[in-house]
Amino acid sequence: MNIIVLVKQVPDTAEVKINRETNTLIRDGVPSIINPYDMYAIEEALRLREKHGGKVTAVTMGPPQAAEALKEAVSLGVDDAVLVSDRAFAGADTWATSYALSMTIRKIGVYDLVIAGKQAIDGDTAQVGPETADMLGIPFVAYIRKIEQMQGNKMVVERLMDEGYDVVETSLPAVITVVKEINTPRLPSLKGKMKAKSLKVTTWSAKDVGADENKIGLKGSPTQVVRIFPPAPRGGREMLSGSIEDQVAAVAKKLKEQSLM
Amino acid sequence: MDYLLTEEQQMIRDLARQIAVEKIVPVRAELDEHNKFPAEIMKAIAQADLLGLYIPEEYGGLGRGSLDFYIAIEELSKACLGVSTTYAANALGTYPLLLFGTEEQKKKYLPDIAAGKKYVAFGLTEANAGSDASGIQTTAKLDGNEYVLNGTKQWITNGGEADIYTVIAITDKTKGPRGASAFVVEKGTPGFTFGKKENKMGIRASSTTELIFNNCRIPKENLIAKQGMGFIVAMKTLDSSRAGVGSQGVGVAQGAIDEALKFAKGRIQFGQPVTSFQAVQHMLADMQTLTEAARSLVYNVARMIDGGAKDFSRASAMAKLFATDVAMKVTTDAVQVMGGSGYMKEYPVEKMMRDAKILQIYEGTNQVQRNVIALDMIKEASRTK
């Protein structure tokens, strides 16, 4: 099976500081890493390849130095890597990024599955996975914690929810995003590192992937950042235990106390 | 310090360091405490291709030289000597096949060893045969198409965990040193069992057991080299591995220095970090200088071997002797620099000090190394007279 992994090069937020006036990241001198959630996507793709055969291709959109992230992916065992890089992509929001990635995936052509991390640790939007699926016109399942089975053009997965998980069956090709519960990423191998060292990363421009210039970069980005603020913390939760009867009684008591019942 | 490493050697160093930091350091105290074999870590080492480092490419390895291998050992040893002993003993067990194996034997065993599918152990030592290898009592008797092994090997690293054992046994008692032969014995062969797992002072993550042979029948093809060449196989194997023990010494010494320095910088006494006191500074300087000298000896012999030198017995004995004596002194001094904290199990240097001791003992005690060095000096002096 042919798998495409979407990766993003991000600043190592463990080392990053925030400009309190502009609420933006101070990126100067901060080392770049593969988005940690994408490491789980790479690992899952490699495990699927080990089980079912095929090929894993890593794709990233970014400036020329993002090739380093792809080389790291190759050192982990990814077969092929494509960098989509063009000044015309500059200023892209998630919509324009997803468009560029979907056009890249169309150009690659043959694939059964696209895997990405659930979100990137710099923007934290979690939008590129679902938007890319939408633009490709194929199913999308988020927050995968386990791939239960793959059979023909069908796949059964476990989607992590706030409480418990859903079992979802989807047809293939599809786009999925994965959570850290899915696996433990491997370390690079020496053979992989040697391959990565001599690798010349395939680089495609906006024109190469046939992107419409009105749909990319700043021009193609409908998002306007009005204000940046930390989200309000989630309210406290209480988990009830005991027999069903006891739990129902406890819920009823609480609802009555708050005059909701 | 710039050691003039090639780009590949730097890659090996970085990779081994990543395994050390991410996989070994978080669990080393637990492995030590519970005498636990580092199964997960060995898998990570295998996946990183480091088990095939010294195995030729035609047998699935990477065909790298001695220096490359020693660099990997050094990095692993900085984190845990128990793990690096497990790793290095795998190579020790492989050398007889690598150096003397037939094409069939190499094809049969080396690819699985390189891939980490099978682990290896070397069985030489016995209750009455340590420094004096001629005391071996395990016998191998040819019976038709099979050899029948009887006897007990002692203190065998990777015992029980390894799948392949290269073993030295006596095939002809009357011939003295020429009466020994080397064999491959696979785990699971009837008549081959393991004795008790030893409870050791240090390197507790490594498995050390007896190998017990009781009418264990192995195919004739499992003989390594020719009958009677057992001692030569053993000595050449130890020649090849000896300087690797030196790199273990360099690694554990450097690991202890790094810990001691980190601690001392943050330890405030009399209103200032203890690193501001000359007494501590001088200790640290001596520790690092000795370790650097040891590293030079080890890298030098590695470059000799990789450059094709024929005779490196003396150089490798010196590297093993000096680097492991340095390891003992430096780890002891690291505990001293850290004072009471160094003595506690919350910090890793007490373990490093316990671990370091074995380096002066195994794979030829440091007394035996001095014998090797002196005899070689005397031999040379009489040649050039």
Image: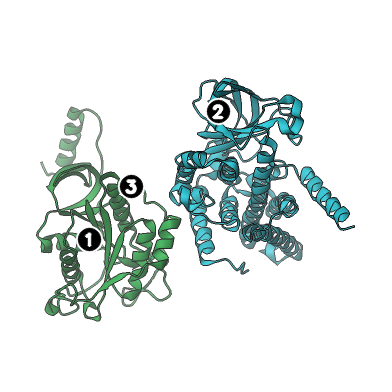
Chain colours: A green, B cyan
Question: In this view of the protein, can residue A70 be seen by the observer?
Answer: yes
Quote the CA–CA distance across marks 2 and 3: 46 Å
For badge 3, the amino acid type reads Asn
- Toward the top, the furthest residue is B215
Q: Position of residue A91 (x, y in %)?
A: 23, 77
- Taking B142 as reference, is B324 left or right? right
Could you say whether the residue bearing mark 3 is in a helix, strand or loop?
loop
Mark 1, other Cα within 10 Å: few <14 / some 14–19 / many ≥20: some
Residue B290 position by quadrant: bottom right
- Residue located beneath label 3 in the image: A183
Can you tell which mark lies on residue A213? none
Per the model, the C-alpha gap separating discs 1 and 2 is 64 Å
Q: Which residue is mark 2?
A: B220
Q: Badge 3, how many Cα within 10 Å: few under 14, some, many 20+?
A: some
Residue A126 shows which numbered tag? 1
Query: Is B352 situated left or right of B381 in this image?
Result: left
Residue A144 locus on image (x, y percent):
23, 49
Q: Mark 1 or mark 2, which is nearer to you?
A: 2
User: Where in the figure is residue B4, as x and y percent of width and height?
Assistant: 60, 68
Disc 1 on helix, strand or loop?
loop
Horizontal arrangement in the rendering, residue B261 relative to residue A80 (left or right): right
Badge 3: chain ID: A
Residue at 56 percent across and 41 percent down: it is B101
| In the rendered image, residues at marks 1 and 2 fall on the same chain | no
Kind of residue sitting beneath label 1 = Ala
Q: Amino acid at mark 2?
A: Lys
